[in-house]
Image (spheres, rainbow, N blue to C red):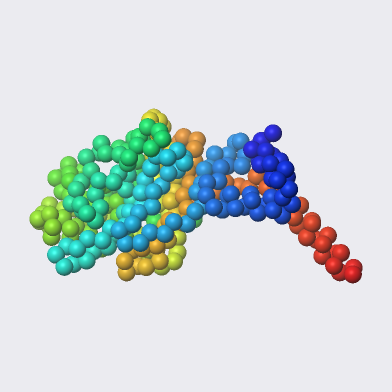
């Protein structure tokens, strides 16, 4: 007996009619983590919409193991009277609105959860070129071994000694913090290229493509995070879901979620038949 059959058996035992059992399945899938339905599939998704406001963040835990893998982080910084909003993808929690000048060293991790830390140095985002902002992917764009990945947030871009903060999805900063608050000259900072790329159309979903080594793995897994910008003025919105391909080195399409299981489809078909029979009985009266 598989997991779907066990769940359906327990729901039957609880006395739920077929409509109630389908609702329970849909609630389980729509409200949180959805595992791939078939044994050969391996997409793991979380479809919960998680809003973020000013100076708020959303944690991304792809494999639902209690260990934060990435973070979509909003920050608002006052640079001597110039209020700057930016939204970034983090693979550590070193800097933020309270300490915007700090650069990660590559050894920091999120607080350790239920498992060992991820290889933060290997984590990266889909980009167009070295030192560019994250690409805003469209639905069904492929994230995988053939994609170009980068993650630039440091004080020695490409060996030049320049500071760069290219992990921004939206960026009113664009080196102002490092110059105004950090005292760097324009020659000492690198302006990221090709963007920023998110939120060009308010209310639409853009996707971040991500590559990671989870929990001590030596191989890459690929995933996506969907981001909707509701306010372009202050770079706030929501993470609308995320998913990853649990089989290493296998690509995933942006926005891909598990297909419904055969049991769920059969249950939906059963409800359709019940509804049709009920309509026929009503018409015959």
- The spot of residue 117 in percent (x, y) is 35, 34
* Residue 279 versus residue 165 in the image, above or below: below
Where on the picture, by quarter, is residue 198? bottom left
Q: How many marks?
A: 0
The outermost residue toward the front is 14
Q: What residue sits 35% from the left and 67% below the top?
A: 232
Q: Residue at x 19, y 63 (%)?
A: 78
Q: Is residue 179 left or right of residue 240?
A: left
Q: Quadrant of residue 36?
A: top right
The residue lying toward the viewer, choosing from 198 and 78, is: 78
Residue at 12% x, 52% y: name it.
188
Q: Position of residue 67 (x, y in %)?
A: 39, 39
Q: Is residue 14 left or right of residue 112?
A: right
Classify 7 as above or below 58.
above
- Quadrant for the N terminus, please: top right
Residue 187 visible in the picture: no
Q: Residue at x 14, y 64 (%)?
A: 80
**146 over 277 or under it: above or below:** above
The quadrant of the rendering that contains the C terminus is bottom right
The residue closer to the viewer here, 163 or 12, is: 12
Instruction: Report which quarter residue 239 is drawn in.
Output: bottom left
Nearer to me, 99 or 198: 99
Q: Is residue 24 visible?
A: yes
* Residue 107 position in % (x across, y down): 25, 36
Q: Position of residue 99 (x, y in %)?
A: 20, 52
């Amino acid at each position: 007996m598989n997991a779907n059959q066990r769940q359906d058996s327990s729901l039957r035992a609880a006395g739920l009619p077929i409509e109630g059992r389908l609702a329970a399945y849909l609630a389980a899938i729509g409200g949180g983590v959805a595992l791939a339905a078939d044994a050969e599939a391996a997409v793991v998704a979380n479809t919960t919409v998680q809003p973020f406001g000013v100076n708020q963040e959303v944690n991304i835990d792809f494999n639902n193991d209690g260990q934060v893998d990435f973070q979509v982080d909003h920050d608002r910084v006052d640079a001597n009277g110039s209020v700057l909003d930016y939204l970034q993808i983090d693979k550590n929690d070193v800097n933020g609105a309270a300490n915007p000048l700090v650069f990660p060293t590559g050894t920091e991790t999120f607080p350790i959860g239920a498992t060992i830390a991820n290889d933060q140095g290997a984590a990266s985002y889909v980009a167009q070129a070295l030192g560019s902002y994250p690409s805003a992917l469209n639905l069904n764009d492929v994230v995988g071994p053939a994609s170009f990945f980068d993650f630039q947030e440091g004080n020695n871009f490409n060996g030049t000694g320049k500071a760069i903060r290219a992990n921004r999805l939206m960026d009113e900063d664009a080196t102002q913090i490092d110059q105004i608050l950090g005292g760097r000259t324009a020659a000492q900072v690198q302006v990221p290229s090709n963007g920023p790329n998110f939120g060009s159309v308010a209310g639409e979903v853009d996707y971040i493509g991500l590559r990671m080594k989870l929990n001590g793995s030596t191989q890459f897994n690929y995933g996506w995070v969907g981001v909707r910008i509701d306010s372009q003025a202050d770079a706030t919105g929501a993470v609308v879901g995320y998913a990853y391909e649990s089989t290493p080195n296998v690509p995933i399409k942006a926005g891909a979620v598990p297909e419904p299981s055969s049991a769920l489809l059969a249950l939906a078909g059963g409800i359709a038949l019940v509804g049709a029979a009920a309509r026929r009985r009503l018409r015959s009266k």
